[in-house]
Amino acid sequence: MRTVIRDGSASGGVSNVRNGIGETWASGPGELKPPTGVVSTARRKELETALFESAGASGSISPLVNLSGVTLGFGKKKIFDGLDLSVAKGERLVVMGMSGSGKSTLLKLIMGTRVPDGGAIRIFGEEITRLDQRALNQLRLRIALVFQYGALISSLTVRENLSLALEELTEKSPDEIEAVVREKLRFVGLPETAVMMPYELSGGMQKRISIARALVMEPELLLFDEPTAGLDPISSHVIDELIVRLNEEMGVTEIMIGHKVENAFRVGTRIAILDEGKIVAEGTPEELRRSSTAVVTQFLASMAAAMPAGARVCEPRSDQRKV
C-alpha cells in the first residue's frame, strides 16, 4: 500500500511530499523540485501524482513531454511495455540504454512518426495520437531533431541546408532568412562555412551544422539521436558543451538518447535508464553516481565495460576547440 504524507498549509503550498521509503519532493510556494535520490519510475510517478493533486487546478505543473503507459511491439518483439516518462520545460534529459532497447523509437514516438499500440503521449499538452495530420504538422514545427550522423543534404551548401526549412515553411524574406542563417552559424562557431559543401566539413563540423539547421525554426523542444556518435573525444566534448549552451542560453528543452556514460553525465540534468521496455531508474548524474541500486550499478558497469580500451573523458585544450 502506498503511503503519501503531505506537510504544509494551504496558504504556504506543499512543502514536503513523502512516500513510505523516504523519497522526498520538496517545494515552497511557486517552487517545485524533483525527488531526491534515484527512484523507480513507479515511485516517481506516485510522487508526481501527489504533487499534481496538491497543486489543484492551477496548472502550475505541466510537463512539456509526458508518455504514460506506452506500449509498442513489432511482431512478437515487445519494444515498450508500459513506458512512463515525463520531461519538464528546461530539462536536459538523457535516455540511456543498450543497443536495441528502443531509444531511437522513443524519439519517433515523441515526433509522432510512430504510433504506439497503447498508452498516451502528450506533447505541449496535446495528446498527439489524437491529432489529425495538419495539427500534428503544426505541433512538429515546435520540435527539431538532430540526426545521429547529421543528415545534411550532400548536394546543398551549408547555407542552403539551413535555409531550406525557412524557405518552405515560413514567409520570411531572403534577407531575413540570411540573417537567421548567419546567426545560427555564429552560435555554433562556424560562421565561415556558409558556402562550403558538407563533404568539405569534418565529422564534428557536420554535427554542429546539423544543430544549427535544427535551430533555424526556433524549436521549443530539441531531440538528439546519439549526438556524439562517431566523433573523437575532443569533438564529442565540443558537442556536449554546445548542447548545454543551447539549454542554458536559449532555454530549449532537450532530450538526448545515447549509451556513452561520460557524455550523459557531462550533459544531462537528469538521466533515465531504459531497459526491457520501461524506464527502470532515473535521477541526476550525481544521484546515479552515488546509487547502490542493483539495476543502476549493473547498467553503468556494463556500459563502462563496452567502452573502447583506454577511453576516458577528455578536456579539450583551448587550441583544439574548433573541430
Image: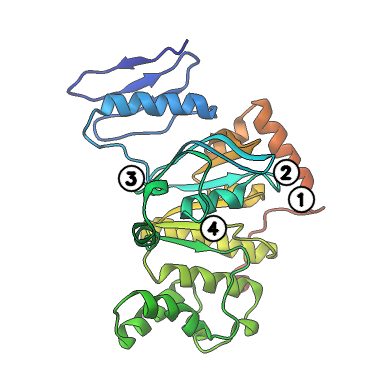
Q: Name the residue rendered at 42%, 33% in the picture.
A: 34
Q: Tell me the mark number nearer the camera, choosing from 3 and 2.
A: 3
Q: Tell me the mark number nearer the camera, choosing from 3 and 4.
A: 3
Q: Position of residue 320 (x, y in %)?
A: 63, 72
Identify residue type, mark 4.
Answer: Phe
Q: Position of residue 191 (x, y in %)?
A: 47, 82
Give left or right: position of 118 versus 181: right
* Residue occupying the far top of the picture: 1
Residue at which label 4 appears:
224
Q: Is residue 68 above or below residue 150?
A: above
Q: Are the two marked residues, 3 and 4, in contact with CB atoms closer than 8 angstroms?
A: no
Q: Name the residue rendered at 17%, 23% in the picture.
A: 11
Q: Tell me the mark number nearer the camera, choosing from 4 and 2.
A: 4
Q: Secondary structure at mark 2?
A: helix
* Dot 3 or dot 2, earlier in sequence: 3
The CA span between labels 4 and 2 is: 19 Å
Q: Secondary structure at mark 4?
A: strand
Q: Position of residue 169 (x, y in %)?
A: 36, 74
Q: Are the two marked residues, 3 and 2, in contact with CB atoms closer than 8 angstroms?
A: no
Q: Is residue 224 above or below residue 284?
A: below
The CA span between labels 3 and 4 is: 21 Å
Q: Name the residue rendered at 52%, 44% in the picture.
A: 116
Residue at which label 3 appears:
125
**Which residue occupies the foreground of this view, 196 or 147?**
147
